[in-house]
Amino acid sequence: MVETHYASTQFTIYLQRNGVGVLAKSAFMLWLHRFGSLPYFYRVSRPIALALAVPGVLLAAYGVYGGLVNAPVDYQQGDAFRILYIHVPSAWLSLFGYTSMAIAGAVALVWRLKLAEIFVVAAAPVGASFTFLALVTGSIWGKPMWGTWWVWDARLTSELILLFLYLGVIALHNAIESPRSAARACALLSVVGVINVPIIHFSVEWWNTLHQGPTVTRFGRPAMEMAMLWPLLCAALGFTLMFGWLTLWNMRVQLLRRERRSRWVKKVFSDA
Amino acid sequence: MTRTRRRRLMLVGGLFVGLAAATALALTAFSENILYFYQPSEIVGGQAPTHTRFRIGGLVETGSVERNNDDLLVRFTLADCEASVPVQFRGTLPDLFREGQGIVAYGQLNESGQFVADEVLAKHDENYMSPDVAEAMKDASGTSCMPSNMQAQR
């Protein structure tokens, strides 16, 4: 096997460099190198993705159904508040996705880890989709509740900038021909753009905005009844697992595309 | 960690810290412009612009809403904990408009200190509950003069 050979070579080099005294550390490094090995990742990512997909879809469906059907109506907003069961998980993932891209981007820039580069590229369209969903559902909510589809307050504007950052990463990746330079540019934009994430989160506290303040992450008195909160948490967890699934799957696609000339990819397809 | 990696880590970290500092400074400098609305006490205190259009956000004072019978003119006062400003508006109000509700109105102050609005948006708060829980909470505690969603921390 190519990857076993790769890993054992790495291990030997490591021992030669550092001696046997750092065996515990090198065991971790071995695992890291093994997981960093692309054919190994390609092989194990498939069952991992499926293991995320099944509970993710089930939890999301349970949460959304519970929110849309079972949760009680809101005392002021009536049934219209139910759109938050899509809106809040999407908005959460728009922030989570970009933060994870920034962390992977920093790893890619410093350690030149190929998988981290691929993660940045693969997560961008998934995160962009959730951001788009958050903006659209928010707008549909805003029209009956606020009386307008859109306002340029700090929360909405910074979230729109986040969508443009995602689109920027996607566009950069498509614009640069060399995959390595493209990935490095995307990683850099992710790291730089992550400054927007705390701005989005705290915008409703730092400035007067039309958007209301945080409900779930607020300390002290719970701002939401348990019967309403529970489906929301399920939906958020389910959406997060789905984010992992979709991103991992896209990583596999990007990986094959990038390594299409390598021997192991050719072997994958000749075996199939 | 090799020397090149440490150098790259410093570079990425330095870039991030520098940009974060620059952003923080810029946002602090422009803080006034990012404010979506002024509160009634700020307007009474003279902090709001007098000759341009701006937004005012506050609670519709209970018992202050007056409607005309023959057209869509509505008068009410918007208040925060310290001050209140009379507002007039001609048009359709959003569903959530009611006494005690947070409202953001867009318009201009006239000579007599009345705020003439041409757009009224409702601001809902971060509390979600069913009608019976809301009813139970009303018995337990009196409402504060200003829900937390109308107070920006500055």
Image (cartoon, rainbow, N blue to C red):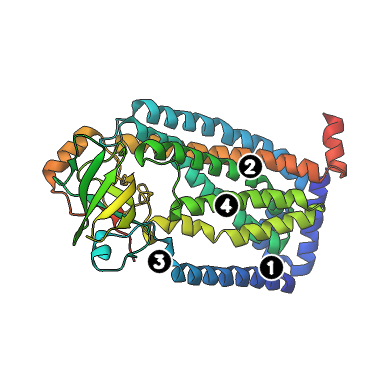
Instruction: Please state if A163 lies on the left or on the right of B6 as rendered.
Output: left
Q: Nearer the viewer, mark 1 or mark 4?
A: 4
Quadrant in which the C terminus of chain B appears:
bottom left
Q: Are marks 3 and 1 in contact (CB under 8 Å)?
A: no
Q: Nearer the viewer, mark 3 or mark 1?
A: 3
Tell me if residue B82 comes above or below residue B62 in the rendering: below
**Which residue is denoted by mark 2 in the rendering?**
A247
Name the residue: 69% across, 70% down. B8
Q: Amino acid at mark 1?
A: Gly
Tell me if residue A159 comes above or below residue A87 in the rendering: below
Q: Are marks 2 and 1 on the same chain?
A: yes
- Nearest the camera: A226 or A121? A121
**Which residue is denoted by mark 1 in the rendering?**
A21
Of the image marks 2 and 4, the number of the one nearer the N terminus = 4
Name the residue: 82% across, 28% down. A272
- Nearest the camera: A109 or A7? A109
Q: On what subunit does the disc labeled 2 rest?
A: A
Q: Position of residue B119 (x, y in %)?
A: 35, 46
Q: Nearer the viewer, mark 2 or mark 4?
A: 4
Q: Secondary structure at mark 1?
A: helix
Q: Amino acid at mark 2?
A: Thr
Q: Are marks 1 and 4 on the same chain?
A: yes
**Which residue is denoted by mark 3 in the rendering?**
B32
Q: On what subunit does the disc labeled 4 rest?
A: A
* Spatial separation of the CA atoms under disc 3 and disc 4: 28 Å
Q: Position of residue B48 (x, y in %)?
A: 32, 65
* Spatial separation of the CA atoms under disc 2 and disc 4: 12 Å
**Which residue is denoted by mark 4 in the rendering?**
A98
Q: Are marks 2 and 1 in contact (CB under 8 Å)?
A: no
Q: Secondary structure at mark 3?
A: helix
Q: Amino acid at mark 4?
A: Tyr
